Image (spheres, helix red, strand yellow):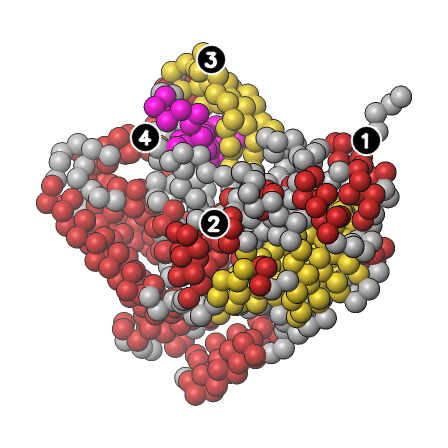
Amino acid sequence: MYRKQVSKLITVGCLILPWVSGYYFHYQDLRHQQAYSAQLLHPELQGRATFTDQAMNNGSALRGHISINDNSYSYHYFLKQSNKIPLLAPGTQCEVKGDLKYLSDSPYSPQYFFIKDINLNSCQANSKASLSLIERHKNFIYQQISHTHLEHPGRIIALVSGDTSYLSEQEVSEVKRLGIYHLIAVSGSHIAIICSITYALLLRLNVPLFYIKLTLLFLLPVYGLYTDLAPSALRSIFTVMLVILIPSRFYHHALDIVGTSFILLTLIFPHFLFDIGFQFSYLITLFILLSQPLLDQTSVIKSLLYMTFIAQLGSFLISAIHFNEVQWIGLFANLIFVPFYSIVLFPLAIFYFAWLHLKIPLNTLDYFINVMFNIHDYIVRWILQLSHFKWFIPQLNELLLTSLLLILLSILYFFVARRFITALTICISLFLILQFFPAHHVNRLTMLNVGQGDAFLVESKKGQTLMIDTGGKHLRPGEVDKHQISKYHILPTFKKRNITSIDYLIITHPHADHMGELDYLLTQIKVKHLILNPHSYTPQQLTHLTERLSQWKGNVIDFRQMPQLNFDEYQLQLLDATHDTSDDLNEHCIITLMQFRDKHLLFMGDATVKNEETLLQQYQLPPIDILKVGHHGSKTSSSQAFIDAIHPRVSLISAGKNNRYHLPNKEVEERLNDNQSAILSTVENGEITLDLETSIERMLKPWKIYEPLKSSE
């Protein structure tokens, strides 16, 4: 009778829990979305801030960590004069002003504080009072390690604490491309090794088991704080602590412990559920635990091979959802690097970290670690040569994602049952389906969210693509371009739509905000035809572009040699209203008139009022349905005569939020508004996609239309 009541209670709980948890996490997600929207509208942040670590200087900017208004952020401060570097020692407090920005378009992406101004007169050194014990210890470690002979001191810090801010952009990019970034981020393997070293050391000293457990229960939370409560680290820490605290008779399987840690963590930190590292950590752990019957019956080497495959299988769904790409090379890379990190690099990092406290130089150890990292880098470069083939996975709806999960579980089931041929057959079938299944292509125009720049993507129903400009940023002297625009705003859209090549790429003129991302994009995606105005480029620039295109067997075309261009249902005219003798490169712009069925679209680039006058004189323009407003809405373009002549129904403005040029110009917006033109801007909407097959009214429905405020008379 008692068992029946318990069984009923469990059944009712299992039925109710999904609804309760669904509502709970939906509410938390809604709060995050609202905070994200508010942050985008008001990114300004100012106040008294504490610089919590030693600033890193790359010649053009300082970066590090800062605490302001009881919140901690990574900061960037671009130096106004490279020879005048403010002394921002750890613990220094100053009045600062700046903007908070998200790394990508996701509300769960990291926030960075871009400092615009530091009031140096307000700065006070107050290190002891303003820094926590852990922050002071981190700074001590950094000071010690910076005086060693290590070639890559930042890697030791990353391996121990998970803090990758001391690594170069190239180092982080390479391990991400190989699918081994999880080995740098603190995860289960790190916690397992720390526990193993602590247990073995204390056992060697004849410490009773009870006190060993107490030591671990103290060390693990401290280490969690040391990693800034990294979700993947807390998963492992909570799991180990539960194993120590809960007697084995209270749980039947390791899944019970992992499930309990998941429930506790998501109740304490609800936003963890939306953290990519947290999702990876738990799903991979789930797949490994479900494979335990197979792993328990195999040798160490076979277990390593099996676990690598199972981990890739467990990460597949998360990679498909968040990155629309699967790092197939990671299967091979993890076979090499998981044992290399676990057996060599991470134990070395832990030992070196402990040795730093003695303040005794050990040059032999420095040399040995340098050799190990050089071997690591050599293998990385070798494997990267094999990673040119990219497996993009288009955006999948909920039904397809559910089907994908069931397929992955079926592969795991047959794999654990040692029916390897069946598992392999399903894997190959899954690859073929995702690779060759007809993608859902539509006739649409996308204004990519590239900040203060231009990048437009035109797609056809048959899958052909045309791009106008790539976006980019003006670099300060000495600043290195990290190509964040491509990585976080252009390529993610391409991957979601399964775009692996660009048929035609038009570069309107050679300004950084229109072609700054071109070089990087040419390393990531095939471009078949690059169309430009050669009079705007030096011979060296043209030679460079021709060489870059040749790797894709693409070609560079003078737009005057291709005045008309047709692809699928689109007819394009490349209009020549250029003033090639002008010193203003904006007046060298290629202007594109596009027709799709009964709609006319006009892309002005950064063409000026002079170009507009020439355009009206030389061409008979039809009424324009969609206008890409010239020069981001600057008053140097979009004259009254021009707007009256083309009478655009929709005006697209690509501009950066709170840009220093204060674009779009209010007069231009009012001019467009007076012509009953609906203004769509990336400032209000981010990335904007217009379905060209629908009416203008339906096309505008999802978007926020900007109407400039009229001054009261």
> Do residues under tags 3 and 2 come within 8 Å of each other at their CB atoms?
no
Report the residue marked by disc 2: 537
Q: CA distance from mark 3 to mark 2?
A: 47 Å
Q: Nearer the viewer, mark 1 or mark 4?
A: 1
Q: Amino acid at mark 2?
A: Tyr
Query: Which quadrant would the N terminus be assigned to in this image?
Result: bottom right
User: Looking at the picture, does residue 712 appear above or below residue 386?
Assistant: above
Q: Position of residue 406 (x, y in %)?
A: 58, 75
Report the residue marked by disc 3: 122
Q: Which mark is residue 709?
A: 1
User: Looking at the picture, does residue 219 appear above or below residue 319?
Assistant: above
Residue lying furthest left in this view? 364
Residue interval drawn in magenta = 60-85
User: Looking at the picture, does residue 185 appear above or below residue 393?
Assistant: above
Mark 2 crowd level (few <14, some 14–19, many ≥20, 10 Å Cα): some
> Residue drawn at (68%, 40%), measured in percent from left and top?
610
Nearer-N-terminus badge (1/2) = 2
> Do residues under tags 3 and 1 come within 8 Å of each other at their CB atoms?
no
Nearer-N-terminus badge (3/4) = 3
Q: Secondary structure at mark 1?
A: loop
Q: Nearer the viewer, mark 3 or mark 4?
A: 3
Q: CA distance from mark 2 to mark 4?
A: 48 Å
Nearer-N-terminus badge (2/4) = 4
